[in-house]
Image (spheres, rainbow, N blue to C red):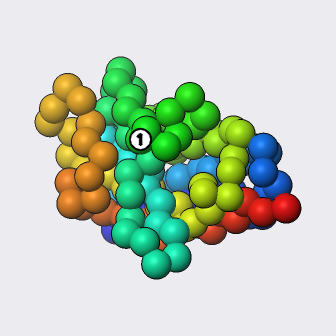
Amino acid sequence: QWQLVESGGGLVQPGGSLTLSCVISGFTLSIYDIGWFRQAPGSEREGVSCITKRGTETVYGEAVKGRFTISRDNTKMTSHLQMDKLTPEDTGVYFCAVRFGVQVRCPLYVEDYDHWGRGTQVTVSS
């Protein structure tokens, strides 16, 4: 039974930081890419960052480049998303997802990921 569980969301002031975690079970994680996505109210789900199955390549969306850092630990079956310099535009529900890794680079498209967590809410507000 596969499962992805996100945690670490919350309310933070603009300019602050949060670290999201995703605990993954039911997969041989070392053959899966991991992606982080977010969805703001009234908006479509968008790609935030992804990391390839062995952690050798990372991709960031333009909106978060230079502020967010993705990581993974295949032995601990986890992924983290370190988020710094947060702005109100970063508000939304954040999801982690996995896909079978077959390419050198991971995609940041929702339709490319097969299994999803339920998300964790991040609110950036003063």
Disc 1 element: loop
> Does the image show residue 47?
yes
Residue named by callout 1: 61
Q: Amino acid at mark 1?
A: Gly
**Relative horizontal placement of residue 53, taking residue 10 as reference (left or right):** left
Q: Residues within 10 Å of mark 1 (few under 14, many from 20)?
A: some
**Residue located 52% across and 53% down the image:** 23
Residue 22: x and y, percent? Answer: 53, 53
The residue that appears at 43% across and 72% down in the rendered structure is 43
Give residue 1's position: percent from left, percent from top: 34, 68
Using the rendered image of the protein, determine whether residue 71 is visible from the camera's viewpoint: no
The foreground one among 101 and 112 is: 112
Q: Which corner quadrant holds the C terminus?
A: bottom right
Residue 111: x %, y % from top left: 21, 60
- Residue lying farthest to the left in this orientation: 102
Question: Is 48 in front, or is 50?
Answer: 48
Q: How many marks?
A: 1
Left or right: 55, with 115 as reference point: right
Question: Residue at point 26% right, 52% down?
Answer: 109
How far from the left and from the top, in percent, is residue 93? 55, 67
Name the residue at 20% across, 54% down: 112
Q: Given the current orientation, which residue lies at the most extreme bottom position?
A: 42
* Side of 90 relative to 105 (left or right): right
| In the image, farthest residue toward the top | 56
Say which quarter of the image contains residue 83: top right
